[in-house]
Image (cartoon, grey):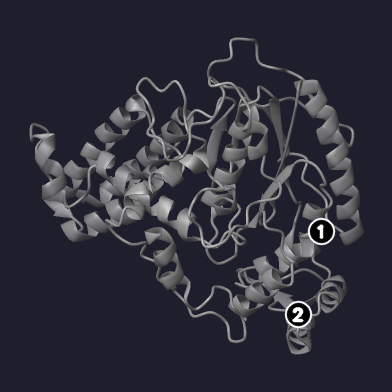
Amino acid sequence: MTVRLAAIAKSKGLLHPNQCGSLPGLSAADACLTLTHEIKTLQRPRLKVSTLFLDIKAGFENVNAPTLRARLLASKFPFYMVNWVSSFLSERTCTLVFQGSPNLSSPVSGGTPQGSPISPLLFLQYVSPLHRSIPKGLMVSYVDDFSITVASSSNRGNVRRVQELFSTISAKGRDIGVSFSVPKTELVHWRTPSQRTPPSTAPIELDGHLFHPSKVVRWLGYWFTRALSPMHHFRHKMSLAQAIFSIVKRLSFPGGGVRPFLCHRIASGLLLPILTYGADLLIPNYAALRGMNSFWHRVQRWRTNNFFSTATSILAREACLPPIRSYYRYRRPLAVLRVACAPLYANPASARLPQSFPSLSAFRAQDSSRHLTIGLSSVYLPLNWRTETPSPALRKHLPVDALAHLTLPLQEGLSCLPLVLHAPPPPGTTIPPPDFMKRTYQAQRA
């Protein structure tokens, strides 16, 4: 039912293209890639860019079943699906289970049940009007996490514009019974690495609360600095992996503990995903790679019980754990394939591919800022996605263009895009089309 409801909601226009999360083929990386791409695009014509990060307070608990039913009926959803959703959200009870509890059930009057796979999708449909209330500016959301990005000639102008947009979406949110959490609200004035002027300290006042700009913000598991440097993100992930490793390494010690194959599962299934989270979007620099390599060598020695004098060049083979540098080179092409092969109308990052990119559709994001880069001088003009990055890198690709550049070997006929549908499309719909893989391969060969 979740797959069927998501497909029909997309076809009926009930979900905004910039809504990510709890939808097939979308992840936090797509939302963050869309945000960083627009920020760097707006910075090319030397505009000041600011972003306000918001979080809906108790989002799932505020879903009103009659309001959602009326919206589904207005969108001409199948009547049996509307009745199923209404039945799913009505006559629910809640029981608190703890030691000594009376085991009594209490009726729940509103909201969607936590833990159900369809609850996030119903919440996305419920808050989709918040996206449509932003006529100018970029809003990207992941379930209940929202970001509003604006650009102008000054940061104070951005603050005034963000205040207007916040007032608009707050009024729209009150109409549907949702509000934003004050402690989770953050403001960032973005900068370029080449800027030498002092950072802007212009605060923003929202509903009587004053928010000063943050130096670092955490959004969807990614750590963003004002200059969008990846160093802070990977330093934080390495600290988190080290803290977890200090606990799990007690499970195995030289001459005892759990079996080596279980240590391999812990390293590859727990430590490696934490250490490399964000590798599909951010590229670690030399200093970050050196620190992560040093930590990963410790994990490999723990996996194999080798001496500290053992050469690090053979640790990866002995432990059957890939080197960090090779694993990063493996993760990034996977992100490239996912963005290049996704339907443009369903993925906000794919909808920002260059117009000359050989896609199946000519559709592109309506709120993209790429048109602002037309006619810029050679210093600020983004590098064409087909052009190799020069050395030294006087000009660079935009984030989405950099991923598009990595698909050039595929377009030369060396291989084809490995599109495999994990689940068949819902009956009676064309999302995704049945001949999606064939058409993509023909487009790449053209």
Report which quarter residue 188 is drawn in.
top right
Circle 1: is it few (<14), some (14-19), or many (20+) Cα within 10 Å?
A: some
Q: Inspect this view and state whether residue 288 appears.
A: yes
Residue drawn at (26%, 34%) of the image: 293
Question: Closer to the camera, 167 or 218?
Answer: 167
Q: Inspect this view and state whether residue 278 appears.
A: no
Q: Secondary structure at mark 1?
A: helix
**Disc 1 vs disc 2: which is toward the camera?**
1
**Residue 207 % position (x, y):** 89, 37
Question: Closer to the camera, 388 or 56?
Answer: 388
Looking at the image, residue 318 sits to the left or right of residue 373; the answer is left
Q: In the current view of this chain or complex, which residue is farthest to the front?
A: 446
**Residue 203 % position (x, y):** 78, 23
Compared with residue 56, is residue 76 higher up or lower down, i.e. above or below?
Answer: below
**Residue 93 % position (x, y):** 74, 79
Q: Secondary structure at mark 2?
A: strand
Q: Amino acid at mark 2?
A: Arg
Q: Which disc is residue 19 wearing? A: none
Question: Closer to the camera, 142 or 184?
Answer: 142
Q: Which residue is mark 2?
A: 92
Residue drawn at (53%, 75%) of the image: 433
Residue drawn at (42%, 31%) of the image: 235
Looking at the image, residue 231 sits to the left or right of residue 269; the answer is right
**Residue 97 % position (x, y):** 63, 72
Q: Amino acid at mark 1?
A: Pro
Question: Closer to the camera, 296 or 41?
Answer: 41
Q: In the current view of this chain or complex, which residue is farthest to the top?
A: 197
Q: Which disc is residue 129 wearing? A: 1
Circle 2: is it few (<14), some (14-19), or many (20+) Cα within 10 Å?
A: some
| Alpha carbon separation for disc pair 1 and 2 | 26 Å
Compared with residue 345, is residue 288 higher up or lower down, i.e. above or below?
Answer: above
Report which quarter residue 388 is drawn in.
top left
